Amino acid sequence: MNFAGMTSGEWQAIWLTAKLAGLTTLILLLLSAPLAWWLARSSSRWVNGVTALVSLPLVLPPTVIGFYLLIVLGPQGAVGGALEQIGLQHLAFSFWGILVGSVIYSLPFAVQPLREAFGAIDPRLLDAAATLRASALDRFFSVVLPLSRGGILTAVVITFAHTVGEFGVIAMLGGSIAGETRVVSIAIYDYTQSLEYGAAHRLSAVLLGFSFLTLLLFYAINQRMMSPLKPR
């Protein structure tokens, strides 16, 4: 396999994929942490409904999500139309559009690990911190986050890897625009459609190798973090 022979377009697709996955992961960490905390700790009657809504991408075909996002973010949609009315470009067939799609489609992969980690924290630890006059925000950063590092790591790795391999939402919402929406998965599909199996194999091998190394590193770090301290 000659990776040195990769074209500039392929390197561009790799960079775009990494950029999309990185931004999606960062945005979802910021959005999912408070949402997961509320789902784990709230007794509101809305918890089940919100949980079902967050989990929808797990059961809906990506093409369905991509189709409705295309309608909403396109020039005739509620969001796309509103943007055009104020002089901005609609989000369909753009990088920012597929970023929105990736955030929505990967939402449960970030929320679920965080929710489980937050739910496993002993409430007495938070009560003890409160008696020491720690504010709610201080308790979250000094107690909750350190105790949830395993869940945070899981959310980061799974969200990033899931976004790297995403195809259906991006194909529906972004198409295949070089430098804008043509990520690695789309490039592989394009090569396959044009019977360029060598190029498709080259990019597929990149994704396969990346996915394996990512999971290998994740399990190694997770095992190290979760292992009990050895007596000296």
Image (cartoon, grey):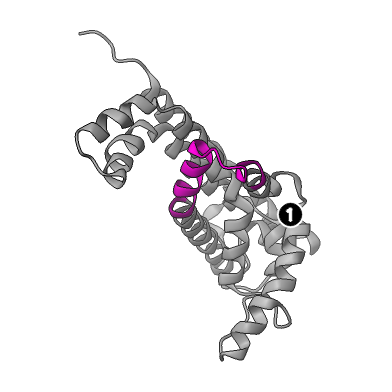
- Please identify the quarter of the rendering in which residue 224 is found: top left
Q: Position of residue 219 (x, y in %)?
A: 47, 28
Describe the element under mark 1 as helix, strand or loop. helix
Does 17 lie within the magenta span? no
Q: Which residues are magenta?
A: 29-49
Q: How would you rate the neighbour count of disc 1 (Cα within 10 Å): few for under 14, some for 14-19, many for 20 or more?
A: some
Residue at 73 percent across and 59 percent down: it is: 65
Residue type, label 1: Pro
Residue, disc 1: 62
Q: Position of residue 140 (x, y in %)?
A: 33, 41
Camera-side residue of 35 and 160: 35
Camera-side residue of 30 and 99: 30
Residue at 62 percent across and 76 percent down: it is: 91
Quick check: 147 above or below 136?
above
Q: Quadrant of the C terminus?
A: top left
54 vs 149, left or right, is right
- Dominant SS of magenta comes to helix
Does 39 lie within the magenta span? yes
Q: Position of residue 83 (x, y in %)?
A: 59, 83
